């Protein structure tokens, strides 16, 4: 089984060919192919890392953009009438890993 640890959207993800991964928003259109930065490659018993990864490529296809769950932020100060409500939804991208070479 071949899998790789890649850097995607500020985090590290374990991926293999055919996996669907949700990462922070990546620029590009649906169907575009992007390259992910490999950190570690495992091929059976062989582990590759460091400078040996210079020729390793991990390709992924953009499946669709998404939004994360709604997060509500509420600030409140006692006895002053100060209330502040704010919301946030993280912009995400769903990727499908197409090739590890």
Image: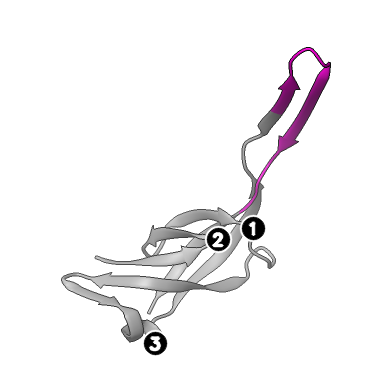
Residue 56 picture quarter: bottom left
SS at badge 1? loop
Q: Give the distance between the C-alpha atoms of the residues marked 2 and 1, in whole angstroms.
A: 7 Å
Residue 49 picture quarter: bottom left
Q: Which residue is drawn at 64% across and 58% down?
A: 25
Residue ID for mark 1: 25
Q: Give the distance between the C-alpha atoms of the residues marked 1 and 3, in whole angstroms.
A: 26 Å
Which of the labelled discs sits on residue 97, or is there none?
none
Please provide percent x and percent y for residue 94.
Answer: 57, 55
Residue ID for mark 2: 9
Q: Quick one: label 1, few (<14), some, or many (20+) residues within 10 Å?
A: some
Do labels 2 and 1 touch, CB within 8 Å? yes
Which of the labelled discs sits on residue 55, or is there none?
3
SS at badge 2? loop
Please provide percent x and percent y for residue 7.
Answer: 46, 66
What range is drawn magenta here? 74-92
SS at badge 3? helix
């Amino acid at each position: 089984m071949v899998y790789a640890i890649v850097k995607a959207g500020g985090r590290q993800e374990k991926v293999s060919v055919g996996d669907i991964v949700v990462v922070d928003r990546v620029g590009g259109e649906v169907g575009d192919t992007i390259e992910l930065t490999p950190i570690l490659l495992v091929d059976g018993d062989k582990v590759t890392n460091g400078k040996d990864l210079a020729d390793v490529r991990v390709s992924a296809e953009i499946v669709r953009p998404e939004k994360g769950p709604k997060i509500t932020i509420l600030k409140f100060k006692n006895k002053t009438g100060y209330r502040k409500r704010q919301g946030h939804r993280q912009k995400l991208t769903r990727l499908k890993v197409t090739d590890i070479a």
